[in-house]
Image (cartoon, helix red, strand yellow):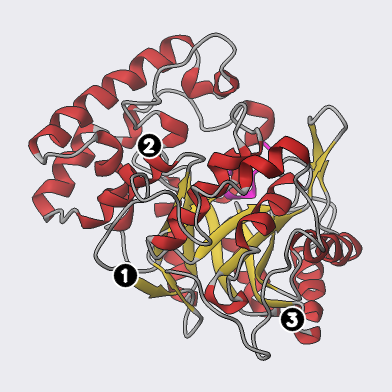
Amino acid sequence: MGKIQGTMAHRIFPTAAFFPSLQGAERAAATRPRVTACGASRDAAPRIERMQTTTLGRGGPVVSRAGLGLMGMSGIYGQADDAESIATIHAALDAGITLLDTGDFYGMGHNELLLRDALRRGVRRDSVFIQVKFGGQRDPSGAFVGHDASPAMAKSSLAYTLTRLGTDYVDLYMPARLDPQVPVEDTVGAIAEMVQAGYVRHIGLSEVGADTIRRAHAVHPIAALQIEYSLMSRGIEREILPAVRELGISVTAYGILSRGLLSSGTAQVAPGDPRTRFPRFAGQNHARNLELLAALEEIAAEHGATAAQLAIAWVASRGEDIIPLIGTKRRDRLAEALKALDLTLSADDLATIEAAVPAAAVAGDRYAPAQMATLDAERQS
């Protein structure tokens, strides 16, 4: 991507001198000379010939064929190193990724501040597409305590997000979950007012079902639905995927490796691994799911690829309207994942992969029962 010089017509992300977020040793680490303005050290940055692009939604903006999910950079799955996270964002930009996914509750604002620091050095605002989730409520311990997608919260959260990111607008804004106390029409209507005011460019939804999508889309066009989609999580194929395709809505797919279960390097869990709270990583469920991974590894070896690459390539094969979000906080994992975009899978290949990891054979739900009960997508899919 390289360093892009700004003009008066395109806002540049502010420098740390005006908007400090990392302090002391963290800032020193984040600004070491080994990291260039938009790229990681040359021996670590992934290299692909050309990142493909796609349109987000019907007639919407052009974005990279894959996006970068930043959640893991703010402690959701254990400790992360800010300097390595920033270098990973730079490497993604160098590789041609333009879509960056964050949430205001990731690290209680830490993720947005981290993203601002990563983009502050000479990156033109219109060269990246930033999508932000809001509404997840957390207490001082970090525990999730509910969801608030009321009109007032939508506008207030956006104000804080714009300040933390140091930008005048976000490209796509979406509630992280359906608020059971607030009609989706009210939430989308409030965001639509922010679109009219110029603070938001596009509206998205996350983890909602087909009926809710239709109601929201009737208020204001929805550009994208963010939802979990992988070989191990295929529930959206029944009702949700047909609905979004009918309406011309793209899918930004998270959990494409089922939180590491489809990756040889991260499928195992150690004591204290935060993923053990997910049913698929518990006891016999985990053991059964590792058997599915082993079957995928055999196929991957025949393609000269890793299981993770094959799983990502499968998601990408679902259609131009499916955008895989690569969730990583490390450059080496990013480099491995990006190679998946070079894989070409035939219809026979896809059938073999799906037979090795049949959705019905996956052990355990994707969330614990209490969380599953709050997911509108699960009630309607």
Are circles 3 and 2 on residues that touch, CB within 8 Å?
no
Q: Residue at x 12, y 33 (%)?
A: 301
Instruction: First in sequence, mark 3 or 2: give its number.
Output: 3
**Quadrant of the rendered structure where residue 213 is?**
bottom right
Residue under label 2, please give it.
232
The residue closer to the viewer here, 326 or 366, is 326
* Residues rendered magenta in the picture: 373-378
Residue under label 1, please give it.
52
The residue closer to the viewer here, 381 or 86, is 86
Residue 335 pos. (x, y %): 34, 46
The residue closer to the viewer here, 138 or 369, is 138
Q: CA distance from mark 3 to mark 2?
A: 36 Å
Instruction: First in sequence, mark 2 or 1: give its number.
Output: 1
Give the label on residue 195, or none. Answer: 3
Are circles 1 and 3 on residues that touch, CB within 8 Å?
no
Q: Secondary structure at mark 2?
A: loop
Are circles 2 and 1 on residues that touch, CB within 8 Å?
no
Q: Is residue 376 magenta?
A: yes
Which residue type carries mark 2? Met
Residue 286 pos. (x, y %): 42, 16
Q: Is residue 89 magenta?
A: no
Which residue type carries mark 1? Gln
Q: CA distance from mark 2 to mark 1?
A: 25 Å
Q: Nearer the viewer, mark 3 or mark 2?
A: 3
Q: Secondary structure at mark 1?
A: loop
Crowding at label 1, few (<14), some or many (≥20) Cα neighbours within 10 Å?
few
Q: Is residue 297 above or below residue 83?
A: above
Instruction: First in sequence, mark 1 or 3: give its number.
Output: 1
Which residue type carries mark 3? Val
Q: Residue at x 79, y 66 (%)?
A: 162
